[in-house]
Image (cartoon, rainbow, N blue to C red):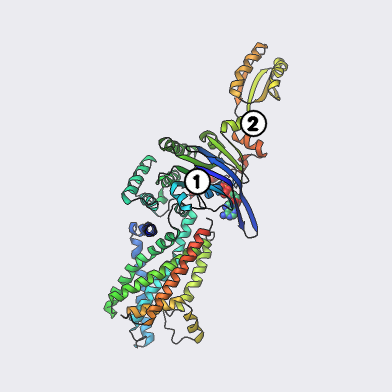
């Protein structure tokens, strides 16, 4: 167990070194969600006509969705880095070390979450002057929940990258095809209350929905809402399924 | 160091199945330097990947450094170094970081990993390159970095898959210098694959010839050449002496004859050309034959492969690999 933790940490640190050695890439990735918040937020406020959404201000409602979105974007794309390393031979070299197979997945996924923590905090800080109310403890728990979820999505992304290792475009085709329906059907960008019945039904089968609802409750400063528990279940299921599929794919694939 | 019994691997892709390796029995002792020689697609890499636990055997078994590859793959990986056919260092990382992290992957502490990394960079002529990005290295430098990565855990057994493919002769010689020095210093057992005849011939002490997934010969290069093809002794004599000379050579084997402006070139295959030639020349001299020229042509491993399979290894050598590696 202790070697599993050490292995994961080593893999995470190797990946993180790309950011440490070239911090400018992080600055760029920080701008993206801010632009999104600045351009989409006012649209949504106008759309709501000055009314509250789900009992909170549109900004308070929208911001947790943005944080979930950047998690999903970052972790679902991370397989493409792996694909590159499979192509060059670096992954085979790493496979030939005694590292635990699951640490290869978790360590890499955690790397995508490192900038996320920074991104999340900066988004909150920027939004505060515009009326966003920060509940630090709740936000911290929210980020942990996202971390769990992100490890699962990251592992699935790696599994996809490995399955599609001989053709790069298949990875992107599948990733993009899945990403947007999941996003829209989670109520992340626009509330689903006014959506047709089939969409509402479909959203109930989307783990992301539960996560978004949990993050909204947490960012609004409440632990007591049942959605927090459901969010935890959704994140845990995603992590377990993702790691199971990911580790099986690694051990069964021929590189 | 290595013991295998009927080690086999079949790949199934769709409805097709490829028997890449078909029952390899092999024993490699401590300190040996063994080359797997065979054309592309012979099954060299597949064998190596089974021995390094990267690929599960379909049947048979392999024990590497005392550990069964199927029962304890991580145990095998801890005890070996593996340098694959492709470059092992990540392109977007720094040289020093990759090497230190490789040490961490083997469970070394931070300071020990850094110490070994620095020592390896020094001994592989990469000192001062710690902060360079891997993608900025030359092909030869990258291959030496691969070797450093494979050595960070100080393994008693090192596998190299086509270590010098695509390198120019100078870089290849330089790489070999490093491999041989390593062996001298640490007594590392080395198993490598190659499809370069000259490389297997001059560098390895033992050549395992693989074709179609099977071992078809396994001996020193010297013995393989002597046993399979023999040396070719060529003597040039005046045309007038040709009959007498042929009679003298005939007991050694079939004599080939070529006439050229008043002289005749006679050739015969013998087991040990260098020892036989002086005796033949003296005998011919005693017979009153004037020997005007003499040469021994050592057979190459290609002659060995040709006589074993009826095919030449050279046909299989891919053109343009030099360009590929330098472009990568
Ligand atoms: N992952 C794979 N899937 C299907 N066939 C493979 C795979 N890897 C190797 N082979 C096949 O197995 C045979 C041996 O390949 P390999 O061991 O790479 O040969 P070598 O290293 O001697 O050139 C070849 O016919 C090759 O096409
Ligand atoms: Mg090969």
Q: Chain of mark 2?
A: B
Q: Residues within 10 Å of mark 1 (few under 14, many from 20)?
A: many
Q: Which mark is residue B64?
A: 1
**Residue A39 in view in this figure:** no
Task: Tell me where residue B310 sits by quadrant.
Answer: top right
Residue A158 lies, in percent from the top left, at 47, 63
Residue A85, image x and y in percent? 46, 56
Q: CA distance from mark 2 to mark 1?
A: 34 Å
The disc at residue B211 is none
User: What residue is drawn where x is 51% and y is 35%?
Assistant: B203
Disc 1: host chain:
B
Residue A93: horizontal and vertical position, in percent?
A: 46, 51
In this orientation, which residue lies closer to the viewer: B157 or B239?
Answer: B157
Judged from the image, the secondary structure of the residue bearing numbered disc 2 is loop
Instruction: Give the side of residue A116 with respect to residue B24, left or right.
Output: left
Between B313 and B225, the one nearer to me in the picture = B225
Q: Is residue A26 above or below residue A133?
A: above
Quarter of the figure with residue A110: bottom left
Nearer to us of marks 2 and 1 is: 1
Same subunit, tags 2 and 1: yes
Give the label on residue B229, or none.
Answer: 2
Camera sees residue B278? yes
First of labels 2, 1 by sequence position: 1
């Amino acid at each position: 167990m202790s070697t599993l933790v050490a292995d994961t940490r080593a893999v995470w640190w190797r990946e993180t070194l790309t950011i440490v050695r070239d911090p400018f890439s992080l600055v760029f990735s920080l701008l993206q969600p801010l632009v999104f918040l600045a351009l989409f937020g006012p649209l949504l406020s106008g759309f709501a006509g000055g009314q509250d959404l789900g009992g909170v201000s549109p900004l308070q409602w929208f911001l947790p969705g943005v944080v979930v979105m950047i998690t999903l974007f970052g972790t679902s794309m991370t397989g493409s880095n792996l694909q590159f390393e499979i192509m060059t031979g670096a992954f085979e070299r790493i496979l030939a070390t005694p590292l635990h197979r699951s640490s290869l997945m978790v360590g890499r996924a955690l790397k995508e979450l490192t900038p996320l923590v920074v991104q999340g905090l900066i988004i909150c800080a920027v939004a505060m002057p515009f009326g966003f109310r920060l509940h630090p403890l709740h936000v911290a728990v929210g980020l942990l929940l996202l971390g769990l979820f992100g490890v699962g999505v990251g592992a699935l992304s790696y599994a996809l990258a490995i399955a599609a290792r001989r053709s790069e475009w298949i990875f992107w085709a599948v990733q993009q095809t899945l990403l947007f329906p999941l996003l829209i059907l989670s109520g992340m960008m626009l509330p689903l209350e006014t959506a047709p019945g089939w969409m509402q039904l479909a959203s109930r089968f989307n783990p992301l929905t539960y996560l978004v609802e949990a993050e909204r409750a947490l960012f609004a400063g409440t632990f007591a809402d049942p959605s927090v528990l459901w969010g935890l279940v959704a994140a845990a299921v995603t992590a377990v399924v993702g790691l199971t599929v990911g580790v099986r794919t690694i051990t069964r694939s021929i590189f | 160091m290595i013991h295998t019994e009927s080690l086999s691997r079949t790949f199934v892709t769709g409805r097709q199945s490829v028997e890449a390796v078909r029952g390899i029995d092999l024993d490699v002792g401590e300190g040996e330097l063994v080359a797997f020689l065979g054309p592309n697609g012979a099954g060299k890499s597949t064998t190596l990947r089974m021995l390094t636990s990267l690929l599960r055997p379909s049947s048979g078994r392999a024990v590497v450094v005392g550990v069964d590859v199927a029962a304890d793959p991580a145990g095998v990986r801890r005890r070996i170094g593996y340098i694959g056919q492709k470059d092992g260092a990540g392109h977007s990382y720094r040289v020093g970081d990759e090497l230190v992290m490789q040490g961490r992957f083997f469970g070394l502490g931070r300071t020990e990993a850094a110490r070994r990394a620095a020592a390896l960079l020094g001994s592989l002529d990469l000192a001062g390159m710690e902060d360079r990005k891997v993608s900025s290295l030359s092909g030869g430098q990258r291959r030496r970095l691969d070797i450093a990565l494979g050595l960070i855990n100080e393994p008693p057994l090192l596998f190299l898959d086509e270590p010098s493919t695509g390198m120019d002769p100078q870089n290849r010689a330089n790489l070999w210098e490093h491999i041989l020095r390593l062996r001298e210093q640490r007594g590392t057992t080395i198993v490598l694959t190659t499809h370069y005849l000259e490389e297997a011939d001059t560098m390895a002490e033992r050549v395992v010839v693989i074709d179609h997934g099977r071992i078809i010969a396994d001996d020193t290069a010297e013995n393989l050449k002597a046993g399979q093809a023999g040396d070719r002794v060529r003597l040039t004599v005046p045309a007038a002496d040709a009959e007498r000379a042929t009679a003298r050579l005939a007991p050694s084997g079939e004599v080939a004859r070529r006439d050229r402006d008043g002289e005749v070139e006679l050739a015969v295959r013998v087991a040990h050309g260098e020892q036989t030639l002086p005796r033949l020349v003296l005998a011919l001299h005693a017979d009153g034959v004037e020997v005007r020229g003499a040469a021994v042509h050592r057979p190459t491993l290609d002659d060995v492969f040709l006589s074993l399979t009826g095919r030449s290894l050279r046909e299989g050598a891919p053109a343009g690999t030099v360009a590929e590696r330098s472009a990568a």
